[in-house]
Image (cartoon, rainbow, N blue to C red):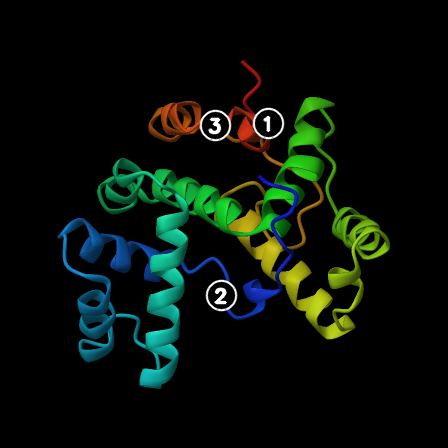
Amino acid sequence: MDSSFPYSASLTREPFLFYEMRSTAKLMTEGISEDAIVKEIAEQNLFQYPTEKSITRMAKACIKRLHALEDDSLVSAIVSQPADVAKQICLYAMMKQSRLVWEFMLTVIGEKYRLRDTSFGKIDLNTFFMRLQEQNDTVASWSDTTITKLKQIIAKVLVETEYLDNIKADHLNPVWLHPVLENAIRNNGDTAVLPAFHCFS
């Protein structure tokens, strides 16, 4: 990921969204326009949200994240593959869209796999954010509440994608990079990201 890409705290509003991503991807594969996708999601209340405003915002967020994949075959795979594969692709989409998630997955998770260190705890999230706050003015300006929320969201993402068994887990599970995603990552020239998926070949 380009280091000039700004850090953003948008995850506090747009967490993993697996169910929403899958619903949006399904409409995208039908080849309808983005406006039509947003309209359909809002009118059918496909996300089951209480207000239409939040549905429209989330639908647009999902479209943006799916576009970050830059790969139609992966968008289709989110729809057609089993949940564990689709979740892994959604994590990759999240990484492509968020410098924060990209760097966390590479510098913390990927590094642990590389060193065969399976320990994991709050200290890893704390250290990651402390380091960023020291290095980056944008991150330094975020409130404690925002940082706390971001830590919670990243931890939940790790649980949803089976890196952690639960929110209190103290060790990382070995993950298996599904071939459909591995091939796409290699084709996209994103091999730098493979360690985040426990892949070193």
Q: What element carries label 1?
A: helix
Tags 2 and 3 touching, CB below 8 Å: no
Q: Answer with left or right where residue 16 lies relative to residue 11.
A: left
**In the image, is residue 74 above or below residue 19?**
above
Q: Which residue lies furthest to the right in this view?
A: 134
Residue tagged 2: 14
Q: What element carries label 3?
A: loop
Q: Answer with left or right where residue 97 lies relative to residue 24.
A: right
| Residue positioned 36% across, 38% down in the render | 85
Tags 1 and 2 touching, CB below 8 Å: no
Q: Residue 47: x and y, percent?
A: 30, 71
**The one of 10 and 152 positioned closer to us in this rendering:** 10
**The one of 65 and 171 positioned closer to us in this rendering:** 65
**The one of 133 and 148 positioned closer to us in this rendering:** 133
Residue tagged 1: 195
Q: Residue 88: x and y, percent?
A: 43, 40
**In the image, is residue 128 above or below residue 187?**
below
Amino acid type, label 2: Glu
Mark closer to the chain start, 2 or 3: 2
Please tell me in which quadrant of the rendered image residue 152 appears.
Answer: bottom right
Mark closer to the chain start, 3 or 1: 3
Q: How crowded is mark 2: few (under 14 residues within 10 Å), some or many (20 or more)?
A: some
**In the image, is residue 127 above or below residue 74?**
below
Amino acid type, label 1: Pro
Residue tagged 3: 176
Q: Residues within 10 Å of mark 3 (few under 14, many from 20)?
A: some
Mark pair 1, 2: CA separation: 25 Å
Q: Residues within 10 Å of mark 1 (few under 14, many from 20)?
A: many
| Residue positioned 26% across, 36% down in the render | 73
Q: Is mark 2 on a helix, strand or loop?
A: loop
Q: Which of marks 2 and 3 is in front?
A: 2
